[in-house]
Amino acid sequence: MAKTLILIPLEADGTVGKAARDLLASALAADPGADVGVFGKGAKQAADVVPASASRVLVAGGDGLASPTAANDARACEALVRASGSQLVLAPQHSRTARCLPLVAVRTGGRIDTRVAGISLGAETKVRRWYYRQRMQAAFTREERPWFLLLESGALPAAEASAGFSGAVEEVSWEPCSRTQALGTEAAIAGEQTIRPDADLLLVAGAGWTKKQSDGQTHVPEAEELIRAFLRATGASLGSSKSLVDQKGEGAVISFLTHMNQVGQTGSSPRHPKGLATCCHGEEPHVVGWRFIGERRAINLDPNCGWAQGKADVLYVADAFAVLRRLNELLG
């Protein structure tokens, strides 16, 4: 088995994200004795999350990594890769790693594959990726080294992390880029945050929320309040069908939904353990985005909708307004 380095990026607040922690535990369970590299401001303090089975822990920190920039992140990661001497580099699919690791692969003469959906570690490392809008999956390997792999959440079997690393943490020196200066951070989405990749539950809203209800009237303000209250009480992430986000120019819409919330063939493919679809009909292009959801449930008044045709584990034939109203009461 090729020597492995697990690269861990720090979040903006200096912590290690859930996807990175999951990768640490599962990768070290599959390949005990791999090296671990942590980069970001305060990397040495964050290294205590590394499991005890790691061979070495290398860190690259400093003020130059306080704000994520491709130039400085690439220099820090290159220093970690060269200090480790590993031929296989595993990292979570993260905004920092997606920007900087392609640069590191070029500078070290290696190759990189992103959005890896599965990996087999052994005498010959093989990875799996989706193609054709996630309708076809291929397994392959590469001869070029070092080989950089950005792994999706769940690409490796789940594992429990052992006790913290007790060895000496090695600090790796690197030279910040003098031509790049971070001026600040601008939020991509204004207002309340509704996209939470690490949430245990995904709530998806369909176009039915904005249609006329049994009294012949639309109730969009009430729909917004019900959905907001549910998200706040459960910490769920919010998704949307394409038909709902495409209504932006048609008047009554859910104000806090954007195309960033869209789930489906032309949207995102989230990986939450559980999902609840409300007022969606379960059309095939939308359901494609649900293929990685662990447990799928749906609420719809039509017992013959697409969700009932084997696309949902459980279908509740009920009024979504009434169901969410009652759930919010129970959640307090």
Image (cartoon, helix red, strand yellow):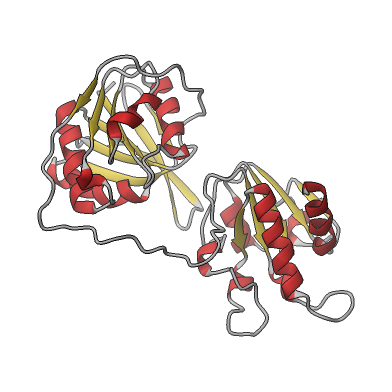
User: Residue placed at 74% from the left, 68% from the top?
Assistant: 223
**Residue 281 in view, yes or no:** no
Q: Is residue 162 left or right of residue 285?
A: left
User: Front-most of 325 and 79?
Assistant: 325
User: Front-most of 258 and 107?
Assistant: 258
The quadrant in which the N terminus is found is: top left
User: Residue placed at 78% from the left, 62% from the top?
Assistant: 305
Counting from the top left corner in percent of width and height, residue 87 is at: 21, 30
User: Front-most of 7 and 221?
Assistant: 221
Counting from the top left corner in percent of width and height, residue 233 is at: 69, 50
User: Front-most of 88 and 163?
Assistant: 163
How many numbered callouts?
Answer: 0
Counting from the top left corner in percent of width and height, residue 181 is at: 18, 58
Residue 237 to residue 117: above or below: below
Q: Is residue 173 left or right of residue 97?
A: left
**Quadrant hosting residue 91:** top left
Q: Residue furthest right?
A: 215
Residue 149 to residue 1: above or below: below
**Residue 96 in view, yes or no:** yes
User: Residue placed at 33% from the left, 28% from the top?
Assistant: 47
User: Residue placed at 23% from the left, 37% from the top?
Assistant: 61
**Quadrant hosting residue 82:** top left
Counting from the top left corner in percent of width and height, residue 86 is at: 21, 27
Q: Is residue 169 left or right of residue 54?
A: left
